Image: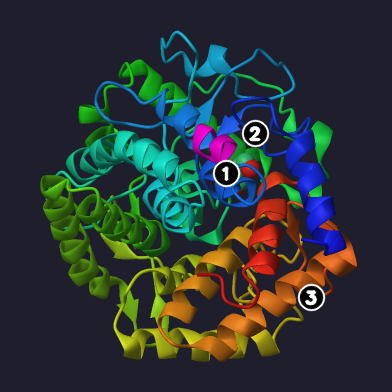
Amino acid sequence: MTHPMIEQAAEILRGNDRGSYTVPTHGLYPFQWNWDSCLTALGLAHFDEARSWTEIDTLFDHQWEDGFVPHIIFHEADDGYFPGPDVWQTGRDVPTTGITQPPVAGFAVRRLFDRARDTDLARRRAADLLPRIARWHDWFYRCRDPQGTGLVAIIHPWESGRDNSIDWDAALAAVPTDGVMSFTRKDIQHANPDHRPTQAQYERYIWLVQHFRSLDWDHAKLHDASPFRVVDPGFNAILIRSCLDLAAMADTLGQGDIARSARAQAQKGLTALESLWNDAHGQYLCHDRAANTTVDSPSVGGLLPAFAPIPAARSKAIVARLEVIGKRSEYLVASHDPDSAEFESLRYWRGPVWLIVNYMIADGLRTAGEDAMADRIVAESLHLIEQSGFAEYYDPMDGTPCGGGSFTWTAAMVVEFLTKGRVPA
Ligand code: GLC
């Protein structure tokens, strides 16, 4: 572990460590975020395995009784972030939000488990986390797929982890703004407003929060009551992958019931995912469940299914799409097709490159035997860091660093790429 970039990454992870959880970055995001923590644990494990298990344990300590796991845990008061606990009002002892995030926990825990040097510790911690993750997955299929289609919907753009993606524009336009509270954004005090979501989008984000709050955060009701219900192929692929990873661990740990149920969920999800494939774009697309329309938006959400065991022909088609996107930009993988009129190279999820997405796509392509493209994504990711440091996200055209700096999950992914070489598995 002598590579200077690993030393820099370790320093960022240490600097953002709050003892039992890690903040994504100082200032802009001063709490614990769900999928940030799970992916960060992969980086932490290279230095301190016990600490990496704790990262995920802390998150699941705040799981709700119905199985739901929040997107933010507000461990300590900090008025540098909006919307804070006073807006969410979820009534938890340690405040949390009432929406969730992409369920990477099953994947991350299996990876920690499979690579563990301290195998006794890993068996104990994994055995404890397994039923909690299974309850979260069950929550998804119960509360976010009430019709039993095999695919879950998000009910707020922030749940996708791709907050202001072009994918949500049409669905978000159907969200009203009447009665929305007046508020002061904090994100644009920490980061360049031109790199962040717009005010019109923020008003709808907050309207949805107020709406769910008025329904007492009753997850049994929120899906049907939300004007925003979108089925995201990337989100579903992450859930499917986590179900399969959970099943594999459950087999090893002798928890047959969990294994069987998780495998059935994944199988149904994989079959249903095919309904989101779009031949014209050569990739998957979102489905607007509220409007019952296909979302004609070629984003990275439709390439992320490479992370799940999709059919080989689909993986190959995604490689072909990546080659095209690679010709239209300098660094893979732009979060939106640069050829599209809505593409914005600096604005958050409407164009920029995110290392965690690169990691998941490369990982899936590697498993599918698509090594050349996986290698290319890893190489371009590391090149970005060399050029621009550990930013939140990057301009795919010239590598300009954007958003917050000294960013935790970016550092974690760099450690993964470098210590696992060109083979992130
Ligand atoms: C932004 C990102 C989201 C991430 C959070 C903390 O909201 O869109 O994916 O979890 O920041 O890093």
Which residue is pictured at 67% across the width and 44% down the height? 198
Q: Secondary structure at mark 3?
A: loop
Which residue lies under the disc numbered 2? 22
The vertical placement of 228 against 284, above or below, is: above
Q: Which residues are magenta?
A: 49-54
The vertical placement of 227 against 110, above or below, is: above
Mark 2 or mark 3, which has the lower sequence index?
2
Where residue 141 appears, x then y in whole percent?
20, 46
Left or right, 196 with respect to 91, comes to: right
| Whether residue 8 can be seen here | yes
Residue labelled 1 has its Cβ within 8 Å of some atom of ligand 1: yes
Q: Secondary structure at mark 1?
A: helix
Where residue 345 appears, x then y in whole percent?
74, 66
Q: Amino acid at mark 1?
A: Asp
Q: Quadrant of the N terminus?
A: bottom right
Which residue lies under the disc numbered 3? 397
Which residue is pictured at 59% across the width and 48% down the height? 45
Residue 36, numbered circle? 1
Measured in 3D between alpha carbons, the distance from the residue under mark 1 to the one under mark 2, in whole angstroms, is 9 Å
Q: Amino acid at mark 2?
A: Thr
Q: Secondary structure at mark 2?
A: loop
The quarter of the displayed image where residue 399 is located: bottom right
Label pair 1/2, CB-CB below 8 angstroms: yes
